[in-house]
Amino acid sequence: MRQFLARPSVVSFFLLAVLLGAAHLSQAQVQLRGVVRDKETKEVLPFASVAVPGTTNGTTTNMEGEFFLVVKELPATLLFSELNHVRDTVRVSSNAILDIMLAPATVVLPEVKVASFPFQLVDRAFRNLQRNYRRSYYGKAFYRQTTRIDNEPTELQEVVWNVKSNPARIDGTTLAQGRYAGRPAPINLSNFSVYTRKFGLFDAQQDSTTSLALLSPNVEKNYLLELKGIVGEDSTGGVAEISFETRPEVKYRAQGTIWIDIETNQVVRYRMVQPSFTGSTNNPRQKFENAKLTIEMSFHPGGKGSVAPLELMKMDLTTDLTEPGKKPLALTVSSFTFFYDQSTTPVRLPYARASLTDRDLDAIRAKPYDPEFWANNPVVKRTPAEDEVIAAFEKRGAFGTMVKKPAAKPTNKLQ
């Protein structure tokens, strides 16, 4: 049997053609950008979902309603959704800036629902999380934290975690990229991310009989609930909006809103305010007064089954920092976490659950700094105000590794 050997020049040409083809495909990718607004009020919609139907490619709008999304080619179909608005599908044929208007969803308050209905929904959501707690998702999360004292930015932290999560919380993280900048200030909160990494709607390791969480067997004992309405076309389906607050006799104070899908019992969104947050600093003379912590969680819409992975987490702390003999300082700390590239395929990484002994700054400094990653990454979402803060820190060389090293002095050698 005769054998035919390919000529080297033919093989080289074939490989070159493949490489050029791959380069062409990568160049064909298009970055789309735009703003999502309420159709009636024209107000921007933060945290609205933007996705390419039938794929895992998607993103969310930032606090200014802006989004950036890379697609393979044009034309492309995008699906826009937000909890309190009607979904809309848009065919995009150019990379012009998009201005998307979403109509408000119908909110129904059915008369047939008795007072126990919101308690039933919360209990079903709790049982659903409890049953699916061991379901794991693996992906990445982008975290940004900004600290301000008397409205002046004093601290900035940005990280990307490899993250393992479940339908109720973050299970563990390991640092992939990170950077930190700060200027001299009375206080720094470089480990504030522990609140994001430790908080959850439900924790199987806690004693459920004494839990003060909303999603626990003790909801009727600890909370007052009110059904505010059902977001959807009619009262047979949709998402129930339920307000909650701790009963007066309960010492722990919390209030907020939870949104639950009536058909799947899935928590879609959660917002909770602790009006009497307690915290302490390493300086025994400093105290937090009038402290309030706001926690928001959002889960991917349209998840398969009765649970879905985390999409967004937000933590905001406002307080007065006091110290004897000094004027109180208005302290605000805001953090935003966006989860992406999530799947159920296990990833073998050293995920670690958050601990109060964690030191974010030490972990960030242990990683080589990559300025290109932060400059050209579409996952790194920024509002114009955040861009201004980051630019100011970068200009001062606040991210230590961005400071150019002095030129080496010539050495004198003996001839």
Image (spheres, grey):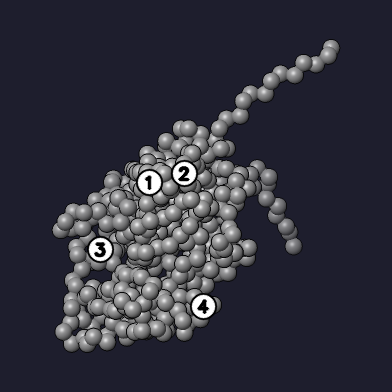
- Residue at numbered disc 1: 329
Instruction: Work out whether mark 1 precedes mark 3 in sequence or the reverse, and give the earlier one.
Output: 3
Question: Is the Cβ of the residue at disc 1 closer than 8 Å to that at disc 2?
Answer: yes
Query: Residue 97: horizontal and vertical position, in percent?
Result: 28, 46
Q: Position of residue 286 (x, y in %)?
A: 46, 51
- Local crowd size for mark 1, using a 10 Å CA cut-off: few (<14), some (14–19), many (≥20): some
Q: How many angstroms separate mark 1 from mark 4 (CA)?
A: 36 Å
User: Can you tell which mark lies on residue 206?
Assistant: 4
- Spatial distance from mark 2 to mark 3, Cα to Cα? 48 Å
Q: Of discs 1 and 3, which sits in the foreground? A: 1
Mark 4 element type: loop
Which of the two labelled residues, at mark 1 and mark 2, occupies the earlier sequence position? 2
Residue drawn at the location 26% of the way across and 80% of the way down:
237
| Circle 3 SS class | strand
Q: CA distance from mark 1 to mark 3?
A: 45 Å
Residue 311 visible in the snapshot? yes
